[in-house]
Amino acid sequence: MDKVVAGGAVGTVAGIMGGIISRVLFGLNVGKLCLVEIGRGIFFQKEMPGITDSFSWHVLGWVAHLAMSIMLGIVFVYLLHYTGRDYALLKGAMLGVIVWYVNIGIISPLAVYTPLPLDAFSLLLMLAYHVIFGLISAWLIVWWEKKQLPSS
């Protein structure tokens, strides 16, 4: 199995699933943060009302979100290759926690793009999205590897 292709595919599928869940809950006002909205927000430091609400900006948000998901999928395939498939779901969940912490806790504040308002529930929901991404990625990698093995 080609690791870059597998990681790209896994990242795309997990990113789409996580993005849809995030977008739906954001649209229903369950959470105040959305992975796709944060994706488009990386291209500017402060929200520009009316300018960034166009269809093109929403597409850019999905592109940015999926690009990050693909990169993380590739990293995770290599991580599982070098650490083994044992406890893959746990490793996926831990990857999600690490990515959440680095992105929301370190990179966003340093880039002066901290999604506001910062309420605990929305931050926990973001953590859940990242853990779900890691779990889906881990499951898909292990599933795909089993499908690629020759039957005995």
Image (cartoon, rainbow, N blue to C red):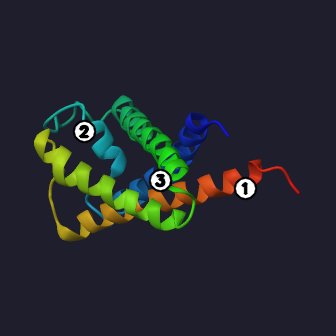
Q: What mark, if any, has residue 20 been given in the picture?
A: 3
Labels 2 & 1 near each other (Cβ < 8 A): no
30 or 19: nearer the viewer: 19
Position in image of residue 12 (x %, y %): 53, 42
Crowding at mark 2 (Cα within 10 Å: few <14, some 14-19, many 20+): many
Disc number lying in front (1 or 3): 1
* Distance CA(mark 2)–CA(mark 1): 38 Å
Judged left or right of residue 107, residue 138 is right
Residue at left offset 58%, top offset 38% = 3
- Residue type (three-letter) at the residue carrying disc 2: Gly
Q: In the structure shown, which secondary structural element does the residue marked by tag 3 occupy? A: helix
Residue 48 marker: none
Residue 45: quarter of image = top left
Between 94 and 31, which is closer to the camera in this rendering?
Answer: 94
Does residue 51 sit above or below 128 in this rendering? above
Residue occupied by mark 2: 41
Q: CA distance from mark 2 to mark 3?
A: 17 Å
Please give the residue where the numbered disc 1 appears in the rendered image.
Answer: 146
| Secondary element at image label 2 | helix
Residue 101, picture quadrant: bottom left
Q: Residue at x 24, y 51 (%)?
A: 102
Residue 56: x and y, percent?
A: 37, 29
Q: Please tell me how crowded label 3 is: few (under 14), some (14-19), or many (20+) other residues with Cα within 10 Å.
A: some
Identified at 24% across, 63% down, the residue is 123
Q: Earlier in the sequence, mark 2 or mark 1?
A: 2
Based on the displayed image, in which of its 4 quarters is residue 37 positioned? top left
Mark toward the start of the polypeptide (2 vs 3): 3
One can see residue 148 in this view: yes
Give, as a three-letter code, the residue at label 1. Answer: Lys
Is residue 33 among the parts visible in the rendering? no
